[in-house]
Amino acid sequence: MAENRLLEPVLDYAIRTVLQLFEAEKGYLILLNEDGTLNFRVRQDAHGNLLDEPEENISHTILQKVIQKQESLIIADAIYDKAFKTAESVQALRLRSVMCVPMISRGKTIGAVYIENRSETALFTQADLQPLKFFASQAAITIENALLNEALEARVTQRTAELLDTNRRLEAEIQNRIRMESELRKLSSAIEQSPSSIIITNIAGEIEYVNPAFTTLTGYTLEEVYGKNPNFQKSGQTPEEVYKDLWKAITSGETWRGEFVNQKKNGDLYWEFAVIAPIRGRNQKPAHYVAIKEDITLRKQAEEELKRLATLDPLTEIFNRRHFFKLAEIVFEQAKRYRRQLSLLMIDADHFKQINDQYGHATGDQVLQTLAQYLEHLIRKADLLGRYGGEEFVIILPETSLQSAYQAGERFLKFLQQNPIQTQRKAIPLTLSIGIATYNPDTTPSLDKLVDQADQALYMAKQAGRNCIAVYSPPE
């Protein structure tokens, strides 16, 4: 696949987004060549450094399997995975966690997204696989759109140059008029039928032409916008610096690419990606400007949904474990630096396995969802709530003493006592075991240590018969 100006930034942005969202150490965006070979088009680490093409046989084996079968693959922890733990790549290179999903467009595999981690503290989970599959499907669409727009830009630029050249030749050769009219009809047809919005302005930026796609998208006809500057569509949500950079580029004879949030005739806002270039006159100075625009609202919405899926637990819609600890680390460091009070609660739903066994996993899921809603309702805005795993939840309470944390735990127990979990099957009484640990500069050097202390207290609460609170006390 040849290099092109629209696709390369899209691919680069895609892999940087994946590395950031999934906190991966290395990432590869692979496109499938027409002959079936793999083209490692983008190769980056988490710091944006260019990587060599992977030499490990295991990486190529995974890619061939994913691309040929159109199936996603996750290796949560290769050291404990029966199929991979004996591989030389796993042992020699300390490969720990891998996710690879195919990029499929119109039923055909066009490539794959491959990310990996070699740290035991950042292992991928099954919950990460669905967001990555969603990303890959959107990336496939975006890549196809980029290729189409690159071709359209090249065609319009080529035809525009041919038209200007024909005009010059008409002064000397009247016979060339027929060819010029033919080229003009082709260009007009291409612009009129283009799925992208096309705007042509004079050198002052006043609109002289818009194609039907512009009218379909915005609701404005040529008669309504003729003579206006395109900035009449401003929504107020695009930074002024964007417009300054735009005019600086095109008045210097350069092509500008960027994004706007614009407003339709009915008041609706929409995102668009624009390529704006000068059309040069006989003296090679800009005589007009042409803008080719693509509606990217759906892509932007998909990106926002991807971010949401990457931070929230899909069942309870509270913070997932990874994002919770990312935020909690910040809170802990602030408490450590300024010697502020900080408490952490580990919470376990008592006898949850019995609920699953007696009522089924669907009812068990409802119980966890409702419990998460209860806890979210009972905590303060400054507190952080996350799903630790299974039926366990974790809450970090900034500026909170041990006594206040204990009182919060009592509120949880009392609320559950008065409010059984309502499910489609029946109202199910639920109790909690709660372990509490409070930050101590002398005994709590890290967030992991604070979590471990709270976990020890949780174990004590379970040993004490459950439906109670236990507090961690450092050994004397």
Image: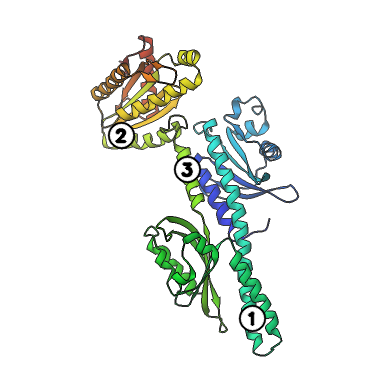
Q: Position of residue 160 (x, y in %)?
A: 61, 74
The first of marks 3 and 2 along the sequence is 3
Which residue is found at the position 55% from the left and 36% from the top? 130
Name the element at disc 3. helix
Q: Nearer the viewer, residue 219 or 287?
A: 219
Residue 175: percent from left, percent from top: 71, 86
Q: Which quadrant of the figure has residue 372?
A: top left
Which badge, 2 or 1, comes first in the chain's sequence? Answer: 1
Q: Nearer the viewer, residue 311 or 158?
A: 158
Residue shown at 46% from the left, 20% from the top? 364
Relative vertical location of residue 338 with respect to residue 207 in this rendering, above or below? above
Q: Amino acid at mark 3?
A: Glu
| Residue at left offset 63%, top offset 30% | 91
Residue 321 is drawn in which quadrant? Answer: top left
Q: Residue at x 48, y 38 (%)?
A: 309
Residue 336's disc is: 2
Q: Nearer the viewer, residue 22 or 380?
A: 380
Q: Nearer the viewer, mark 2 or mark 1?
A: 1
Q: What number is the disc on residue 305?
A: 3
